Image: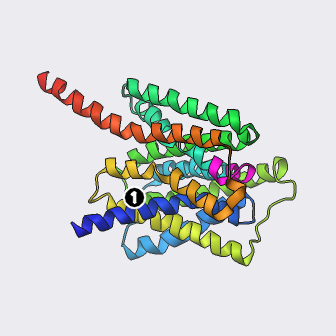
Amino acid sequence: MPSITNDYFKLHFIVWIWGFTAILGLLITIPSVEIVFYRTLIAAATMAPLLFLKRIDFKLGWIPILKIIGTGFIIAAHWILFFAAARVSTASVCLAGMATCSLWTSFLEPFMNNKKIKAFEVFLGLTVIVGLYVIFRFEFNHALGLGMAVASAFLSALFSVINGKFTFRYDPYMITFYEMAGACLGTALFFPIYTTYFATDGLQLIPTSMDWLWLIILAVICTVYAFSVSVEIMQRISAFVVNLTVNLEPVYGIILAVLIFGEKEEMKPGFYLGTLIILLSVLAYPILNKYYKRRAQPLDNLR
């Protein structure tokens, strides 16, 4: 029993770490694209010796490697939008938009796996739209940031569904290594477009000494460590409990943002009402999904 309790504390600690990433994005002074480049570069460089120590074979074949690296491109776009959303609005607005991630997953997973969409998922999706409308109505000056965060959540859901297929074939740590390498490569390939159309001052690839500290924390703790521990915990705790707990990431993140940045993160009551509607929808999803499966079991037994 003490071991299980310890796992629950670890899980909430991991979710708290993930909620801290938007704040780190604001603490680092270099732009979002450069943040993603260094985050993925450091993460891949950290994963390489870890795989060597675990004696995991790097060989997968060119086609699987290219598929995983391609998924890394999606991850890079997700993180660039995520950090940019926090920059053009606030960490709280960014995390409110990211709260739609699990609901995006509920639609993408059936679509990509040729499964039937459940009626309650449509209802929850519409409820999230109501929550976003409430936020837009009261915080229209943050519309761009919220829109970017929702797009980032969509990309997060997309690569999560793709990773769900990869984990049945390849080692999770190997997937992470190649995806981080792919995300780093994808970001580097984006540099010419970025400097031509978006970065008026050119690339800013010289972080300050404090930037290096925050980047290392972001890459090693929030990426490599958090992922490794979450995989290890899922050997003893059900995926349902893990997913339910991960849905609390925006809550932890918004609380941390208000505590750290104070008045800058304070919003009108309508923002918190809209965020509450989104979070209730997100938290209701796994509960309703479990009820739906239990209800379907007796029908399956009759067939």
Answer whether residue 13 is magenta in the image: no
Name the foreground residue: 200 vs 210. 210
Q: Out of 64 and 198, give the one closest to the viewer.
A: 198
Q: Quadrant of the C terminus?
A: top left
Residue annotated with mark 1: 172
Residue at the image position 59 percent from the left and 49 percent from the top:
95
Magenta segment, prevailing SS (helix, strand or loop): helix
Given the current orientation, which residue lies at the most extreme front position?
269
The correct choice, above or below, for 144 with respect to 82 in the image is above
SS class of the residue under badge 1?
helix
Q: Residue at x 58, y 37 (%)?
A: 274
Kind of residue at badge 1: Pro
Q: Residue furthest top?
A: 303
Residue 276 visible in the shown view? yes
Residue drawn at x 66%, y 42% as measured from the top left: 146
> What span is colored magenta in the figure?
84-93
Count the marks: 1
Residue 256, percent from left and from top? 58, 61
Figure check: 295 above or below 238: above
**Could you classify mark 1 by the number of other residues whose Cα lies within 10 Å: few (under 14), some (14-19), or many (20 or more)?**
some
Q: Position of residue 222 (x, y in %)?
A: 52, 64
Q: Give x and y (percent) for residue 14.
A: 45, 62
Q: Is residue 177 left or right of residue 273?
A: left
In the image, farthest residue toward the left: 302
Q: Is residue 88 magenta?
A: yes
